[in-house]
Amino acid sequence: MEIHSECYPCLVKQALDTLKIIGIDEELKKSIIVEVLVQLASSPTNYPPPYVSRRIYSICASRTGIRDPYHEIKKKSNLMVFGLLSLLRDKVKQSEDPVFEALRMTIVGNIIDYGAGRSFTLEDVSLFDRIPIAINHYDYFIEDLENSSTILYIGDNAGEIVFDRLFIEVLSNLNKKVYFAVRGKPIINDITMEDAIFVGIDRYAEIVDSGSDAPGVALDVATPRFKSLLDKADLVISKGQGNFETLENYKRDRLYFLLRVKCEVVAKILKAKIGDIIIARSDKI
């Protein structure tokens, strides 16, 4: 996916949000935003938004000296949802189709704004049943899953990684070998090795460092191990919008995008609405 005109103000807002979390004076903030604007003006227009985003966060980090401003927010997010894991697991077990229930949960797991200090309760789970599935290739997914032994699961954000763990538990119970990919460096609230180990992903999957320093899959800096799995795993699950933005045009069989639509640009591409659930096989969209 190439960057669209609507992406530019969104990227500036991301920078402002980050600088707000870091906490700096107004003069330094203005200076950094000017540098961000220069970077945006000089970035190739055929880059995916996450590729541009990583340059912006690099500017914020180098100018402030803070490399992981979302560290405490991520930790809080993981703890908040982890406390409900057993209840969520029971909901999956009681479902007529545990695979579908766990899959759907992991997509809508970021419905709560974890960084806003709002408590996440079991009542919120009831919202899952009311979110539309705009693209539903679940039947293809089940068929491909049955014919797959190895799965590369590309993770997305903190907090919702607990839902990822739940889905991976279900997959591992089906005797699937799962590789769980994390970001190579801290970027926004995306998951790193630390987050994956903290929530116990390593009990059910082999954690793989993707090498990506972007809020998506940055193939230009990806590790050889990750690239090999991306090409050779029987099935690839790409979780979240950032991964979709960077892998939309990646050519391979059995590549699935699981996400909630979060912006108008992606909504237009997928012919969906903001907030919709997407369960899409890449060659069917």
Image (cartoon, rainbow, N blue to C red):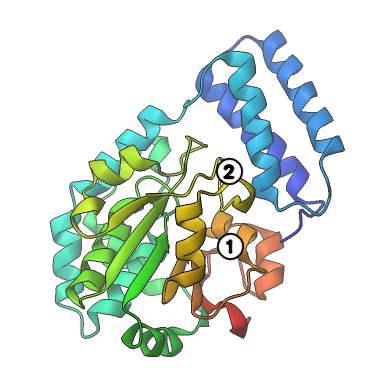
Residue 52 location, x and y as percent? 71, 42
Q: Residue at x 72, y 19 (%)?
A: 32
- Which amino acid is tagged 2? Ala
Q: Residues within 10 Å of mark 2 (few under 14, many from 20)?
A: many
Residue 25 location, x and y as percent? 63, 9
Q: How many marks?
A: 2
Q: For numbered disc 1, what is the local secondary structure? A: helix
Would you identify the image quadrant in which residue 88 lies? bottom left
Q: Residues within 10 Å of mark 1 (few under 14, many from 20)?
A: many
154 horizontally vs 204: left or right: right
* Vertical relation: 269 (above or below) 147: above
Q: Which residue is mark 1?
A: 244
- Which amino acid is tagged 1? Phe
Do the CB atoms of the residues marked 1 and 2 lie less than 8 Å apart?
no
Q: Residue at x 75, y 41 (%)?
A: 9
Q: Which residue is mark 2?
A: 214
Q: Residue at x 20, y 79 (%)?
A: 95
Determine if residue 239 is in view. no
Nearer the observer, 228 or 82: 228
* Vertical relation: 179 (above or below) 199: below
Q: For numbered disc 2, what is the local secondary structure? A: loop
Q: Residue at x 79, y 22 (%)?
A: 34
Name which of mark 1 and mark 2 comes first in the sequence.
2
Determine if residue 182 is in view. yes
Inter-mark Cα distance, 1 to 2 = 13 Å
Which quadrant of the figure contains the C terminus?
A: bottom right
Residue 221 location, x and y as percent? 59, 45
Residue 14 location, x and y as percent? 63, 36
56 horizontally vs 173: left or right: right
